[in-house]
Amino acid sequence: MDKAVIPEALIVLEDPKDDAFQMETMSDKEGFFMFRDVPPGRYKLAALKEGFYNNSLFDFDVLPDQSYDVTIRLINQKGRWNSEYCFMIGGIEVKAVEKDVIQSEMVTTRRIDSGEIDHLQADNLGDVLTLVPGVEKSRQIGLSSDQSIGIRKVANSYTTLSGNETFGTTVMVDGNVINNDAMITGMSSSLASGIDLRTIPADDIESVEVITGIPSVEYSNFADGVIKVNTKRGQVRSRLKGKFNPDTKGASFSSGLKVPFGGTLDYHVNYAYSERDIRKEGDEYHRFYLSTAYSGDALDKKLDYVLKGSYTRSLDDEKPTDANRVGRHSHDYRTTGGLILKYKPDPQLVYSNYFNVDMNRKNNYRSRWVNDQIDTVYGYIGELWEDGREWDINYKLLRDKTVKQKNGNETGTLYGLEFSYQKNTGSGVHLDSIYNYYGAYSTRRSYSFDDYPGFPKLSVYGERNWKWKVRDRSVEMMLGLRYDAINVRGLDISAGNDGISFLNARQGEFLSPRFNTRIELADGLFWRLGAGRSVKSISLSHVYRNSAYVQTFIDSQWVEVEYKQQNPDLKSYYTDKLETSLDWKATDWLGLTLTAYYQESKDQPSTMAYPVGYEINPDTLTSLTYSLMENTAWSKDRGVEFSLNTKRIKNLKFVFNATYRYSLRGEEGRYYDSSVDTSWEEIWVPNPETWKHKIILGQQTSYINQRLGVWLTVDLQYIPFDQKRTVYKSNSIETVLEDHPVTLYQGMTYWYDAERWEYGDHWVLNARLSKSVGQNTEVSLYVNNVFDDPGLWIDPFRGSIYELNVPIYYGLEVSTQW
């Protein structure tokens, strides 16, 4: 992305109609070149330089007695994942994502580059992740609603992912982990979820890596997978972009410049606006975003440094115009600042330092009509306010050494240390004690964030890597071990039933071993195997739930009693994962990959309700309850992934993906039921289990023509199989309901709750087209659900009709750079 001049580049002028005509010259030390006495005609002008991708200008018209100033941009190959080719369609970089048709790493990773993001017209990170096969999202693309992601999770039909399903995926932006660990409020849900991906604009993203396998021990704080986002920096070319569609409109500007002391300053500004329901006033979402990065090198280029910062402001409003008088606003902003230092004393050794400070300012309001009676008042407007700041401070130190031996073998060692601190400050959540937002008889009251302590975390890890050649076959292996201590309160070296303890870590100490290998079985055929454990820290909102207040009749009067709902000993949870893959490069232009995986997660946080008076009598039966977060939830996921990739053949490229996912989840122990028929039901009931599975087929065909400046992509997704079922383990009774002889289990709301739900099949077709309208300008058009097929599904039990596909969604994007 550096706009430096390129000396000694070969410039070739060719006449497509005359193979014998060719003129050549070289650029000088200032990057200038010149052709003299060129006959009038239409030419192809090409530039070539070792270490850069070639670039050609087609249909260049030369008129008699005219001179021309021509700028040819060459893109550096460094850090481009060994792309086979790269050229521009207007301002969009078009390149092969990988040189080979199969991946070359031990860890299952899918990469998305800036060209694909531009071509998709993505607005935010959530949109970008639709390019990853089999990844389930919580919502459609755009800004109309929250977006979160669950790696290798199953979202049935019209349902969405929530809670632990999205909380277990970690997002990293330029090495900085962004999550909701510092969140302490439970105003919207009792379970913390993944971050809202709308807050990360796509226009500032250089590349995205989605790690679904077992990664290096460097990566932490995840249960399901890691999403690595790299933003643009390095004197970015000036670029102006505008987006238009019925839901979202936005504009962005990026640029970079040289600054004193040899560094570069890059900045990116973005504004986006969504009008979610054109029939409703005051139902808009605004996003303002600014990021800057100052980067350079020192000490004879042995030290690289990056000083970066960002500011994201969200204005999410909904005025109370409906019958329920539902109103809200979320006027939050997030600021981040970070310093990256990489010192390379010799070519084989690198010391990396990452320091980041994140602050999420919360300013939220909710209101609604509450249909409760208080004395002579029948109904009222309940209101809720939230005011606070989430602080997240992180430091990471890495030592990475690679030794290449003369026989071609290679060894590497990695050591690391991490420290982080999460804290929530502010006046907290405010509720009217009489006209309570949650109802006149709600057990919720106001509470302050300042009352709760912070979360210090400490991690150390080490890893060893090997690469060998055995009888001309490559063999790779990685062994690593990571130690995480969460919510450290001091030293506590002891031995107990859970093993040796080193620190007093309130939320747990964990050892996470990880192993990967990749073996070349035959020419073009590779086998990969990985196994390991990863730990996900719980959120402050899991531990520090606000107290419940219950009206109890004591000594001939009603007294409000406080029940603590905090669980300071709640533990973080972990996931064990096993994965194996076969990668076959059938020919130079065709590759196939088959992956099978299994992962099991235990001790996930979940809400447990207790009756008031439980401490005195566990068999208490009352509708008055309080709740605690406990480590009772678990999940088991398995699946198979198949992909077929081709290289681009005569401007065409073909990709096919097939994904099968199975998920089983439940909770240990029993749950409390306050309304029981004691003739056959129990007060404490065994928890049910829910399984769901799904097949997703995807096919992508793309056509690129450099001469015409056209990039056309068509995506077809077909879901032939989508089922779920809840298995009850409670007491049952045989009865007849709605003329149906059924087995009714305790805990069921309807007789069909235990039935198998089949959502049938549905498909959707998406298309996008990018066309250059000059050397540096392009126009892109996309249409999702081209045929506006709603994918109708009729609920066989209730008769309700649902649309499994989102409605047709289209837009236009124009950008230019200089």
Image (tube, rainbow, N blue to C red):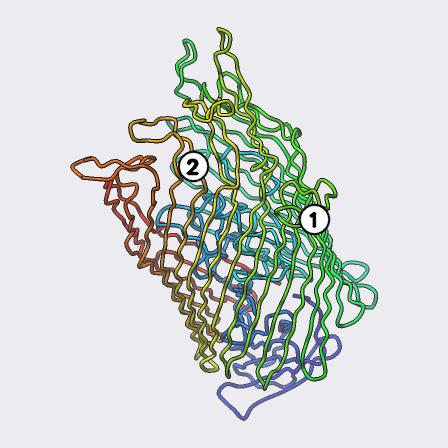
Seen in the picture, residue 567 relative to 596 is either above or below; the reply is: above
Q: Which mark is residue 291?
A: none
The nearer-to-camera label among 2 and 1 is 2
Seen in the picture, residue 792 relative to 379 is either above or below; the reply is: below
Judged from the image, the secondary structure of the residue bearing numbered disc 2 is strand
Q: How crowded is mark 2: few (under 14 residues within 10 Å), some or many (20 or more)?
A: some
Describe residue 805's horizontal placement relative to residue 437 as left or right. left
Relative depth, front residue between 51 and 711: 51
Q: Mark 2 points at which residue?
A: 670
Seen in the picture, residue 671 relative to 351 is either above or below; the reply is: above
Residue drawn at x 52%, y 21% is 549
Residue 638: x, y in percent?
A: 43, 58
Q: Residue 458 carries which label?
A: 1
Residue 182: x, y in percent?
A: 62, 40
Seen in the picture, residue 211 relative to 388 is either above or below; the reply is: below
Describe residue 216's horizontal placement relative to residue 124 as left or right. right
Q: Can the viewer see residue 314 in this picture?
A: yes
Residue 338: x, y in percent?
A: 71, 51
Name which residue type carries label 2. Arg
Q: Can the viewer see residue 85 in this picture?
A: no
Residue drawn at x 65%, y 40% is 506
Residue 623: x, y in percent?
A: 41, 23
Relative depth, front residue between 584 and 480: 480
Give the CA distance from mark 2 to mark 1. Answer: 34 Å
